[in-house]
Every structure is written in C-alpha cells, then in structure tokens.
Image (cartoon, rainbow, N blue to C red):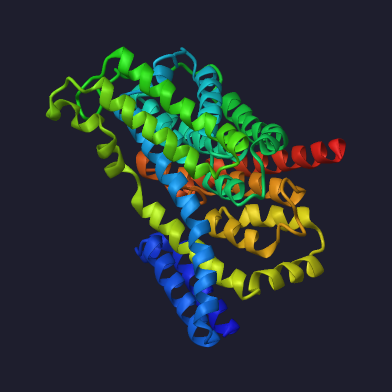
C-alpha cells in the first residue's frame, strides 16, 4: 500500500509541476490524486470507520483554510470593483525610474502583507501598464513586483497561502511571524531592488495617460475610500480577532465579509439594479479564483493520506538522519518551491513534522514560512504572483531567468542569512 501511495502522489505532483507543458489544469491533477490516494488507503486498510474519521479530520482542517481564502478573495474583489486601490495607486508619481522602482517595491511589499501576493501583483502590474509606456521598463518592474509581493507575503499571516496554512494550522502565531520574518523579508526585497534601481538610475519615466476602469462605471470618492479602508481594516483585524476570541481565523473573515456585505447594500440601496450589479458582493463571489480554491482542497486532502499513513513522518526522520541540519533542509525546500508549487511543499512539511516535537513558533516553522514564501521568486513559474505577472506582461521564462532569477536568488540567500543571524542573536 505505501509504495502505491507514494507512486500515485509523485505522479500527481509531477502533473501539478508540469501544468503548463501538459496543458492539464493543476486542480484536476490534485483532485484525481486525492481521490486515488484515499481510495487506495480505504481499500488497503479495510477499516471504514477509522478511514472515515481520518478523512473527516482532514476535511475539517482543509475547510478552515478554504473558507478563509474565499472570504479574503471576495473582500479584495469588492474593493477592486469599487476602484478602491486608486486610493494608493493615484499617489504613485515620480519622474525617475529608479525612484519609481523604490516606491513601487515598498508599496507592493506592504500591500502584499495586507492583501495577498497574487492580488497585489495584479494590482501593481495593472498600475504599471497605466503609468509606463515602454514595455522593457514594465518587464523590469514586473520582476521586482513579483519579488516584493512574495517577500511581503512571507512575514504576514494573511499575505501568502503557505503562511496562512501555517497560521491556521497552529505552527506559527501572527505576532511571532511578523517579528521574526519581517527583517529577513525586507532584506530579500531590498537587495534585488537596490541592484535594479542602480541599473535604471538616471532614466526618465515615460508615462501614458491613465485609462478608465474595465467596467467603465465610476464610483464616488466616498465609496472608494469607504470600501478600501473597510476592506483592508477587516483583513488586518482578523489576527486580532483570533487572538482575542480564540476562534479560528475563518470565522473572523466570514464575520468581516458579512459586515462588508451589509455596508455595501446600505450604500448602494438607492441605485438601480443594473448600475450597482458589478459592485455587489454576489458579483465579487463570481469573480474569485475558484480553480485555485479547488486546487487547495485537492492537494491538502492528498497530502493528508501521506500524513495518516506516517509516510511523511518517516521522510522527516530520514532527512534528519541524512542531512542533519534543519536550516539546510528548509533552504532546499525554499529553492525547490521555485520549480514546484509551494502549497504542497508546505502541506507536506506540516505533515512531516509534528507540533509535539516542533511547537508553535519553532525555528523550523518560521524559517519555512520565509523560505517557502520567497523561494518562489527565483523562477517566474515558482509562485502564483509570478505566473500572474507572466500572463499580464507576456514575460518569457528565459528572459526572467537571465534578468531577474539571479537577483531573486541573491535576495533569497541574503534574507535567509539575515534570519539565521537574527535567530542566533535573539536565542
């Protein structure tokens, strides 16, 4: 049975990693893999009650992450529908490319921590398309935006899917991850940003006129500001909600979603149905990336079978005996996340190491949050932010390898070094 489970998981994992050349959506691969793994496990064990209980536990843990992501995605879509991000983007103006690069980098870094790295990448690259006329300039900016978004997501419990998984799973706490990973994350962004800004020094910004929003319908300044600050306020206060009430984060995000829905309906209650349709939360729900949500369900349930059969625990023991150093193991996981999706990597790591042996806010979990979050920047296909940038700006894989990968790798190791030095100093 164990051999069959490993073979099926490896094949499913390979299909996920090779999504683009195979032209098979990774969500389909994840779901088929999960179905096969649980089927093999159930038939081999023969204990339907035991397998049913374990599946119920896995579904409950997976549902918490999925509900949280759905709520957060919907809030972001509501803010975007109201042109709320113009509150930030309209203030980004400068005459020099190097100054604009620094400004965009830091805005992306902090915005990614509040929203998430994928949404922030889409928002910032869309802004660059409105600001910069030269495609070559936009390519460099897209590369830095990917690095900054992934770095910004690594130090926030709500900034990256993998960090959110660790937070909801109890491996990290909100305040501890901010305190321990903020400095390494900012180093991992500043190093490549400084090099790129030096290359672009002295060059002027060639601007293009700002266009209207895609749906062509404008919102009032009051509506934009209200939805922007209310949406971001809800996202930021979810960690505080969890700390005060000790309820799971998904309850906080659903509570906040209800408040945003209520406020939106009150603000637009006197408008005609046709003019307010694209502003409603129902419309926002139809725009969230359900393909990604389904992928998370599939991969988390697939990894759960390896956890229940102790395959991951045995793999962790083998790595500890063979490599021996946790920092090296986690560094390798981060680099591998540039090639394959970091979600299954982190999910597997959560199954490999128990909270009994490695309690909340242990070195392993914090360093994993940094490495898995920032390692995806090394290749354009290594993160959701990179794939989004690739599609928006038609970035060629090998252009990114030549121009950006080296910078991202330099930033990755610089940030890792900063984390290890900081850990040594504090402990």
The answer to which quarter of the image holds residue 189 is: top right
- Determine whether 390 is above or below 227 in the image: below
User: Which residue is painted at 64% across and 58% down in the image?
Assistant: 350
**Residue 86, image x, y percentages:** 37, 20
- Determine whether 257 is above or below 56 in the image: above
Report the front residue among 328 and 112.
112
- From this viewpoint, is residue 94 visible? yes
**Residue 266, image x, y percentages:** 27, 23
- From this viewpoint, is residue 135 visible? no
Q: Relative to residue 298, is residue 353 drawn left or right?
A: right
**Residue 99, image x, y percentages:** 54, 17
- The C terminus, quarter of image: top right
Q: How many marks?
A: 0
The answer to which quarter of the image holds residue 355 is: bottom right
Report the front residue among 411 and 374.
374
Q: Relative to residue 171, is residue 83 drawn left or right?
A: left
**Residue 70, image x, y percentages:** 40, 45
Report the front residue among 359 and 242.
242
User: Which residue is painted at 53% across and 57% down in the image?
Assistant: 61
- Determine whether 271 is above or below 415 in the image: above
User: Which residue is painted at 35% across and 64% down in the image?
Assistant: 24
- The N terminus, quarter of image: bottom right
User: Which residue is painted at 55% across and 77% down in the image?
Assistant: 50
């Amino acid at each position: 049975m164990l051999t069959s489970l490993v073979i099926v998981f490896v094949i499913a994992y390979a299909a996920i990693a090779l999504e683009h050349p195979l032209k098979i959506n990774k969500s389909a691969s994840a779901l088929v893999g999960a179905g096969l793994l649980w089927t093999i496990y159930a038939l081999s064990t023969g204990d339907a009650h035991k397998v049913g209980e374990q599946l119920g536990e896995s579904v409950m843990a997976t549902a918490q992450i999925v509900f949280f992501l759905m709520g957060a995605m919907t809030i972001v879509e509501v803010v975007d529908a109201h042109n709320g991000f113009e509150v930030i983007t309209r203030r980004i103006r400068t005459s020099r490319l190097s100054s604009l690069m620094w400004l965009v980098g830091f805005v992306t870094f902090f915005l990614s921590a509040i929203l998430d790295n994928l949404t922030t990448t889409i928002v910032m690259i869309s802004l660059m398309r409105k600001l910069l006329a030269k495609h070559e300039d936009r390519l460099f900016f897209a590369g830095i935006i990917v690095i900054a978004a992934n770095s910004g997501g690594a130090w926030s419990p709500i900034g990256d899917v993998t960090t959110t998984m660790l937070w909801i799973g109890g491996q990290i706490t909100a305040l501890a991850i901010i305190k321990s990973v903020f400095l390494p994350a900012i180093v991992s962004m500043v190093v490549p940003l400084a090099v790129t800004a030096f290359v672009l020094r002295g060059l002027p910004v060639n601007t293009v006129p700002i266009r209207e929003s895609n749906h062509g319908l404008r919102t009032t300044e009051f509506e934009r500001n209200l939805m922007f600050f209310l949406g971001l306020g809800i996202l930021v206060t979810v960690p505080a909600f969890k700390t005060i009430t000790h309820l799971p984060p998904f309850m906080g995000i659903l509570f906040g979603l209800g408040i945003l829905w209520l406020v939106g309906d009150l603000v637009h209650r006197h408008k005609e149905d046709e003019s307010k349709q694209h502003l409603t939360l129902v419309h926002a729900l139809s725009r969230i990336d359900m393909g990604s949500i389904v992928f998370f369900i599939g991969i988390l349930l697939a990894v759960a079978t390896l956890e229940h059969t102790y395959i991951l625990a045995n793999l962790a023991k083998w790595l500890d005996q063979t490599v021996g150093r946790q920092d090296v193991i986690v560094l390798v996981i981060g680099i591998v996340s540039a090639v394959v999706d970091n979600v299954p990597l982190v999910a597997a790591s959560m199954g490999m190491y128990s909270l009994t042996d490695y309690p909340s806010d242990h070195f392993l979990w914090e360093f994993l949050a940094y490495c898995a979050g920032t390692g995806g920047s090394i290749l354009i296909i290594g993160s959701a932010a990179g794939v989004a940038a690739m599609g928006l700006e038609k970035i060629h894989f090998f252009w990114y390898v030549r121009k950006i990968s080296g910078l991202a790798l330099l930033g990755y190791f610089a940030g890792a070094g900063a984390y290890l030095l900081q850990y040594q100093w504090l402990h």
